[in-house]
Structures are given as C-alpha cells and as structure tokens.
Image (tube, coloured by chain):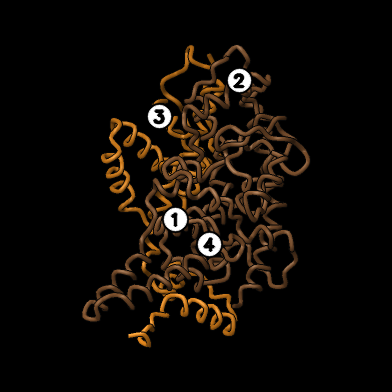
Chain colours: A brown, B orange
Amino acid sequence: MASDDEDESLAHFLESEVLSELSDQEEENKSEEEKYGKRSRPEEGELSEQEEKEQQEAKKIRIEKGKISDEGLSRAVRSSSSLSSVELELEVEAVQSPLKRKGIIVISNNNDNARVGSGSRQFPKRIETGMFSQIPPELLFHILKFLSSEDLVSCSLVCRFLSFAAADESLWRRLYCMRWGIMPPKSPRESAWKKLYIKRDEEDMSEFVRTCPSEFKEYYIQMQMAKRSQTPLPSQVNDDRIILDKTLADQVYMWKSSKGLTDTMVVNHACSGESCTYYQIGDVFVCEKTGNVHARAYLLGYNCDDEKELEAALRFC
Amino acid sequence: MAAETGTPTTLTLKSNDDELFSVAESAAILSVTIRNMVEDGCAGGVIPLDNVDGKTLASVITYMNGISAIPADEEKKKSYRDKFLSDKDFETLADMVLAANYLNMSCLMDAVSAKIAQVMEKKSVGWVRRKFGIENDYTPEEEAAVKEEHKWTFEGVETDDDN
C-alpha cells in the first residue's frame, strides 16, 4: 500500500535527523552539565522533588526531542538526557496500569526502518515555501500534536513534508490511546500506529453500521465521524513528560544515593546496547553507570516482540 | 543556595534589535531559560535574548505579566491565554512560537501551538496550501496515490452489502 516507499524515505529522514541532532544535543548537554554541575553539589543532599522537576523541565530540551528519540534516535542520542526524554507513558501508565504493559513495548516501525536505512525518495527536511518555512520542523511537530486524526490526514495531502510529519508515530499513538485507551495491539510490529488507528476506525465504523437500527444509521455514522475530529487537550499533549510518582522518585533517589550516584548529568555515555546494565525499580530502569532513568526499554531504541525479548534487551539498561 | 542573596527583583531583557525591557523577575522566570540564568546568578546586568525581536519580546512580556498576575487558577489562566492570543495573526503566532521555544516557556509554547493548529483545523487541503503558501510538491501520480490511500481510510464506509 505505497507505504514501503514512505517508510524508506522516513528512514532517510530519521537518519539525517540522528546525525544533526546528535551534534546539537551534544552541545546542549554540555552546557546543561555546566549548569547543573554547579547546582548539584553533594551537600545539597536532598534533591527535592521540585528541584528534580525543574531540572527535568529545563532539560525538556525545547520541543520534546523525545518524539523523535522515541523512534530511532534514542539509542544514539540518549546519553545524558535521561529524565528529559524518559517521558511518555508513565503518566498514562500511572492511571491505567497493568493491562497495556505489553502495548507500550510496541516500538514504532520507524525504528526498524531507520536501521534498514537508505531509501530512494527523499522527504524534504522542512516546508520550503510559505509561512511554515519559518517554523523549524521540530516546532511544527509540536503544533501537529494538537490536531485530530482527520486534520492529520488532510495534512498528509498538502505536501510531502507535512505528509511525513503528520504520519509521526507519537501523534497517532496519542490519538489512538485517546480514543480507545491503551490496548495492546496483538502483534506490535504488524503496523504503525497510524495504520492501527485507521484500521480500528474502519472496524468500528462497519461494526456500528452493521449493528445499529437502520433508521439511525445516518446518525451513527455522523457520531462515528465526529470521533475523528477529536483533538488532544493540552494536558494530553504533554504526556511525553515523565511523571515519576513520588514514591518511585524516592526509591530511585535512594538507590542512586546508595550507589554514590548524584543527579549530575553524565555526558559521553549512551545508555544502550552493551555499554551498561540497568536496575529496575517499579516501572523504570535506572542505568547503573550513570543513574539515568529510563521509563521503558523501547525508549532506548530496542525493538522487542514480547516480554521475553524485552527482558533480554534489558540486560543492558 | 544558588543565587538567592541580593537578586534584583527587576530584570532587564534586551531583544536582538537592541530594545530594552524591564520585567519583574517573578514574571520573567516563567521562562526556564531566564530562570536558569537567574539561578546561576548571571541575570544581574542586561539579559540579551538574541533570538527574539523587540516586537515579539514586548508581546511575550505582556503575556508574562498578565499570566503571572493570575493566581493559581488554571481556568482563569486559560481564558487569559485564549484572550491574549485571539487577536494575533499567523505571522505573530509564528514569531511567538519561536520565542517561546527559545525562552523555554512551555505554557506559552503549548498555547501558541494549539492556536496555530486551530487555524488548520477542519480545513481543506487546498485551503491550507493557499493560506500558508505551501507549494504542492507531489507529482500528480504521488498525489493520486496519497489521496487514494486516505480515501480508502476515511470514506470506506460502504458497508451496505451487509444491510
């Protein structure tokens, strides 16, 4: 369904993003370290929750890079951005717990594609003409977060870049979860969130149409259509921020203290692959080397089919 | 213990076109960028904001003052934001989103982004292209393909066979 091409180009885009972001982020990390290095002296001991939050926020590096790191980037970029990019799920998760554990592990297909690399057609890196040309792509991504599925589909018809941007996994995951809750798709890698959304929408629609009394059919269809124009609320848009609940934060803090780890950011270290091991506390995974906190293995760029594979991947932090 | 002692309560911000603005520190630290400077004790003199022009900065400061004057009441803050953004044209919104990003002000960032998104809501493809001056860079074949793909998506409501 024409998506191979799209995927490949996406891979292309992601690759180049990785490269450019890498250098950006390194710089940012550095300056951040300077800042925080100063602040987190040992005698300040109790890093209060609030302080921690502040740090997180400060590190929420501009427009959540998380979005992209969600996909393929994380492995490469992760290093010290720990809390900043740990984001997502946790908040949602705190509310609707155990069910979706598996669902969360779903890794965007992008991840795969990013690795496969080298597509044929290139997506423009941004919109070249008109008013959107002055808005950098990462900010555009943020804007798209506020659109409904219907609007995202319109966007994909406008031009290539918007089409690429509006197909972003995190956007569709959000819309999907808003509408149906976090239901674990049976086979994570089968499709991307956008396709899942579309498929489910279609199923719902035909189900409704089939089961409703025929005199209400019009009405049901309209109702169903209305769901496509639901836009996320600002509070839902910010689900990419990590919310460690207090007890968890305390535990993490205690564990870190016992290991002699401070909240100082550690640069030049990417928590992934063979570089380090993790310690699990509740739902988060703490890198034993740096104390960086990761919410989910998939944020580290792992692509896991099931719990077992996740387990294996998590032997590294 | 960072910079509590002797911090001035008013900060001076300088736009990239050399306009100077005085802002109460309590309002200015809505910007995490500025807050960090304050905490690191480098907000003593003039704070240069190289990525924000005077016109936009004036606007942002209006917002800072307005929103920080509202006590912790999310409803009221929201309606202030709505009102604040209601008369801004797209050009201004675009400038503000850049500024909010640079200043790291997530509440403004979200509000402006949502506002821009609102402009695009429920609009036809043609309208979006015209309004924002976006060139259609699809080849006719590609465009047809994309259309086809999404048409199937959202118009495939032909379930009459069953009924």
Of residues A103 and A145, the one nearer the viewer is A103
Q: CA distance from mark 2 to mark 4?
A: 40 Å
Q: CA distance from mark 3 to mark 4?
A: 45 Å
Q: CA distance from mark 4 to mark 1?
A: 10 Å
Residue plotted at (69% across, 62% down): A113
Is tag 2's residue or tag 1's residue first in the polypeptide sequence? 2
Identity, as a three-letter code, of the amino acid under mark 1: Cys
Q: Could you say whether the residue bearing mark 4 is in a helix, strand or loop?
A: helix
Do the residues bearing badges 2 and 4 touch, measured as CB atoms within 8 Å? Answer: no
Residue plotted at (53% across, 46% down): A63
Identity, as a three-letter code, of the amino acid under mark 3: Val
Chain ID at mark 3: B
Residue pointed to by mark 3: B23
Residue pointed to by mark 1: A177
Q: Could you say whether the residue bearing mark 3 is in a helix, strand or loop?
A: strand
Q: Could you say whether the residue bearing mark 1 is in a helix, strand or loop?
A: helix
